[in-house]
Image (spheres, rainbow, N blue to C red):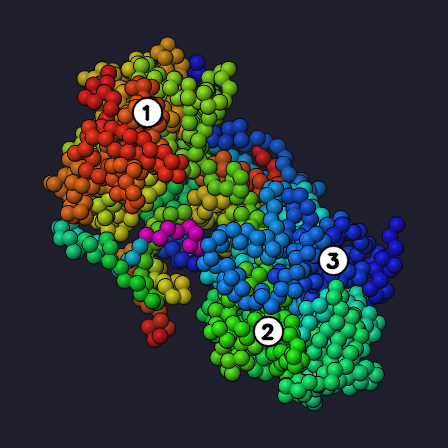
Amino acid sequence: MIRGKEQQPFRISSGGEIERTQPLGFRFDGKNYIGYQGDTLASALLANGVRLVGRSFKYHRPRGIYSAGPEEPNALVHLRSGGRQEPNTRATQIELFAGLEAKSQNRWPNLKLDLMGVNDLASRFLVAGFYYKTFMGLPGWHFYEHFIRKAAGMGAAEHIPDPDSYDKMHGHADIVVIGAGPAGLAAALQAGETGARVFLIDENDRPGGRLRAEQESIDGRPAMDWANETVAALQDMENVTLLTRTTAFGYYDGDTIGAVERVSDHLLAPAPYKVRQRRWLIHAKRVLLATGATERPLVFDGNDRPGVMLAGAARAYATRFAVQAGKSAVIFANSDDGYRTALDLAYAGIDVRGVIDPRTGGQGELKDRVAARGIDIVEGAAVVRTHGYLGLAGVDIADLETLRSGRMPETRFIPCDLLATGGGWSPNVHLHSHQSGRPVFDPAIAAFVPGASRMNDRSIGAARGRFSLAECLADGIAAGRETAQGLGFPVGSSPATPATDEPATGSFMTLWQVPALPGRKARSFVDLQDDVAASDVKLAESEGYVSVEHLKRYTTLGMGTDQGKTSNINGHGILAEARGMDIAAVGTTTFRPPYTPVAIGAFAGRERGRHAHPVRRTPMHDWHLANGAKMIEAGLWMRPQYYLQPGETPSRAAMDEAIIRETLAVRNAAGISDVSTLGKIDIQGADAAEFLNRVYINGWKTLAIGKARYGVMLREDGIALDDGTTSRIGENHYYMTTTTAEAGPVMQHLEVLLQVHWPDLDVKVASVTDEWAAMAIAGPNSRAILSALFPNTDFSNDAFPFMGVRETDLGGIPARIFRISFSGELAYEIAVPADYGTAAWERCIEAGAGHGLLPYGMEALGILRIEKGHVTVSEIDGRHTAGDLGFGGMMSTKKRFVGDAMAAREGMADPSRPALVGLTPLDGKTRIRAGSVLVADPKTPPPVPKLGHVSSSAYLSPNLGRPISLGMLKGGRERIGETVWAVFPLRNEAVECRVTAPVVYDEEGARLHG
Amino acid sequence: MLYIDCPYCGSRGHEEFTYIGDATKKRPDGAETSDPAWFDYVYLRDNPRGPHLELWHHSLGCREVVKVLRNTLTHEILGAGRPGDKIALPDAETER
Amino acid sequence: MADLASPQRRSALEGVLVPGDFGATPFNGPGILLSERGPLSVVQIEAGTEDLTAAAGNALGIAPSGMPNEAAGTGRPRILGTGTGRWLISEPEGRDLAAHLRASLPESAAVTGLSHARVCLRLSGRDARTLLAKGCGIDIHPDAFRPDTSRMTSLFHCAALIDCRSAEPVYDIYVHRSYAVHLFEMLLDGALEFGCRVA
């Protein structure tokens, strides 16, 4: 049974945007409450009389709801539970939904009794820089750090996977308007009418901005009528995209706006197939920043007590949410906003007990209206102290002039449970600043306004300090028209600015802080979220932290989830006062994205889990899976690691057995492996041979048609880039293969050479990696298998020698056969068009059935090539020369090639450079970990001279019966036969090993010829 | 996002491109073997504050190399063309 | 043993592209239609020292456009510009397109068969543009990406050639074979909120 009124003692019975017919049940800190559709969590809590919502960051002081928007420093709650839970969400921006669950943060064991509140009693120790001064540099910082972090944390993140999905979207616009308040709506309407492609973005659930929270009129009707009509007109325009619940969080290069649309955050859970949030990147030609302004608090003793609230927020709760933020209010403001607030709160039925105005004259019309209602007005005064602990009970006011003179003023106590305070408004220049826009200080409003910008942005309305409704509308209309016109869109005659009935307002008085009562240790907070008091700012200044950037790092002013939205300017104002300077000279810190925190999920989008990056599959992928393969990532590719046979269950032993089985099959019978991942490049043109001659270190002019050759490429700096074979298919037609890892870089290298450096060469290159499925059949029985597969081809050594290439067909499937070997065995590679890959592979398996043919994976491939001392990307790792790798003799001296001059430098040919060697454990059984460092003696006190490293390792060569490794060892070729140590300090391993030649199996290479 | 005007594809975001390097360096011709010439080409780079000619490869587009004039201070793309093109500073830049 | 006489092409999407309706199908039917076009013959031609437009026009019965990103032909064949002096030609498998072009074009032209290197997905439906906008940074507004033009771009981090066949819209998306499963899965996953009919 829902009994709205009784359960919402602070709810006003009429008015506001809330839907009283749609009550919503929710839980906060384990207690059930009722709010209404249209509430935020903050407004619903206030309606229920919940004032204490959190504890402060450092001192664990009780804190209440302070604002009604994204600037909220206090009311950060832990929202939802399970995988959807989210810490540090602003209660002021959480739309209420049925079943909402939230918890307060930063308290233990509970909000009312927070034992960490002892920090507050110790606050005179916990001043700016306390942790640095006290603990840093002492032995045992690591010990203290744990407790300090525990005591001073914000919300805690969760490890449970998020069940929701997130998405990304790209947009393109002529004009992006950010903020759908009066200026933004007016601008979007004008721009939209010209036919320009317009995006209008607003972070709230519906457009209107401050109009939703104020008692304003346009053309004699409630201002929201105008807003709603404007929105309806915009929604009718196909060229206008209206995004609500969307925060533009960053302004990036190229006038790109980053925004996050909270598609389902206002729901208990997203609807089926709907995303939780969607991250937008919108490319704009022009950006209109109608981002409004943020109200600043006044800084005085006890200004953080629950019940102290920004005046504009108190008005928003009364007008938009029909909630009394208190029953009895005092208002303290340095502009006519105080009077506006008094009228709105009184209208909402709140007992307004006084307007405290530090000014003595210069007020506008509103003051008279307040006076006429009989509300007490105290001029030249300030709130000097607040009373109450978990909630405000009253305030002391005193004469400001007396206070400033340093004398003890007379104070007067006014009981109240709400203190609405307004210190002026700061334009939201965040997005303007993201791309080095330089805000400038405007003394008339004591705030920074947008300055010069190198982007195509223009700030309008309150975002540039034009605070009246009439100015916002006029600014929006002008900007919308002019911007569209500037882009070449036709505009009609200028419309009249809608009429407003705003009273004339008085002057604004700069008041950075209220001086403390003489003799009192005032707790005047500047940054409520980070517990930075005015005294901390002064302390920092006196210790020499006089730059705003140093002040920020030293005191944490402006850090945290709110990034100083309410505190920065006050802090800088106080610093300026302390330094006796103008705030314009002190400057302000730089705003960086994001404007408000953005969930990591929104950046990841749907690219998570197995879609975290593109996965490439070979044509035989499904066959591998169906035949017991365990797959492993190789770059973006998935490749078989090893194959389990029917009946084998996955285990370490089964894996070892499979690897040994596959390795032995290749050496003793035959194996087949999927080598489709190798890069393949089709090279055509009259100068193709000349081109190959220039990119490889060895000569290519003599390669005959139907032959392949092994080649090594260098980078321009003389370091080895890649190796592989290239075959001559026709007169001017070559087929290059690269390693899997370097396929992309090699292709790009060739394209850059041809397009930039050698445009005169007639050579065309095309990647055909995806065109061909490739399989290597290796082992003594491979000739027999190939003969069965290709009955019309003579595979004898004479007819089809090593490095021979044939174009033929495999029972109707076009095929290229290459007699090349990576395993050192008699071997052939067969390439067929990819869609025939599985069919060809299956034919090979069938043909090999009687010859002991087994598929082999990456592990066996690795063992086989390490036995033969063949290098891969582990050795061609961007640090080694062709000489280091044993290819020094291949470097032609009869021609020029990429990297030749650089490779000829003294240091590149130094005999003490690392050289490829084989490494065998002395005991014949201890495994050598890849990545181990090679040293002469592990017992040498550090620093131990490094002799090299282990680049590749096979834990067991089944053919040799012991582990084998390859390494890069200084002067390695001279050290063959010596011993070195392979050490792996992270695991405290040290293995003594013997240096061998890289090739440890079939050293003379006889097996290659079968 | 930087937007680069690819001579073939048109304006595209930088995520489609790979940065290749400094376009002001001329690769020594085939006859040049001296260390200093190659050393200069491979290693020595100015670090200008302002307009800079660079090569970008449109690797997720037409795979053509684009010569780009980019302001290293502001990230503005001031011009783009083919590797052999001369790319002039916009008038406004020259005045600065 | 498989029939040696007539080997069948096996699509990269076999077992992955399963016909049916997926996701939240609204009352007015799925917002996305997704299918594979194939088998196709796909050939890249690239000019060497001589211009190819006239010769290719003679060989194919329709001249390739010299304008960047412009397509020619209705599909038998379809000729897409993929770079300066470079085109991708596709048509339903039939004649040996590569051999035909090799025989017809000047010696200096490079002819590269890519029939098996590309998978062609056809994407259409009222939400097709929104789906593309999820994974692609180019402007897909109908005024910006017109029928009979194509774009080489990044689609869900895969290099893709997107051919706008009609304003309905209908797109043919050519993707490298090894990326096809990833791209298909990303498209299908992104389409679930609109309802997706896979055919």
> Does the segment drawn in magenta span residue B17?
yes
Residue A18 location (% of width, % of height): 79, 61
Identify the residue shown where x is 67% and y is 40%: C25
* Circles 2, 1 touching at the beta carbon (< 8 Å): no
Q: What residue is pinned by disc 1?
A: A963
Residue A347 can be seen in this image: no
The residue tagged with tag 2: helix, strand or loop? Answer: helix
Chain under callout 1:
A
Q: Does A614 sit left or right of A526 as displayed? A: left
Q: Which residue is mark 3?
A: A112
**Residue at horizontal 28%, vertical 25%?**
A922
Residue type for callout 1: Pro
Q: In which quadrant is the C terminus of chain A drawn?
A: top left
| Picture layout, residue A744 above or below residue A398 | above
Q: Note whether residue A526 is visible.
A: yes
In 3D space, how far apart are the residues under numbered discs 2 and 3 (Cα atoms)?
A: 26 Å
Q: Image quadrant of residue A687?
A: top left
Residue under the image location 72 percent in, 59 percent down:
A53
Q: Which residues are magenta?
A: B13-20
Amino acid on which disc 2 is placed: Ala
Q: Chain of mark 3?
A: A
Q: Secondary structure at mark 1?
A: strand
Q: Which numbered disc flags the more N-terminal residue, 2 or 3? A: 3
> In the rendered image, which residue does mark 2 sit on?
A534
Position in image of residue A231 (x %, y %): 68, 64
Nearer to us in this view, A540 or C39: A540
Disc 2/disc 1 C-alpha distance (Å): 68 Å
* Mark 3, secondary structure of its residue: loop
Is residue A305 one of those drawn in magenta?
A: no
Callouts 1 and 3 in the same chain = yes
Between marks 1 and 3, how big is the CA–CA gap? 65 Å
At x 84%, y 83%, the residue is A374
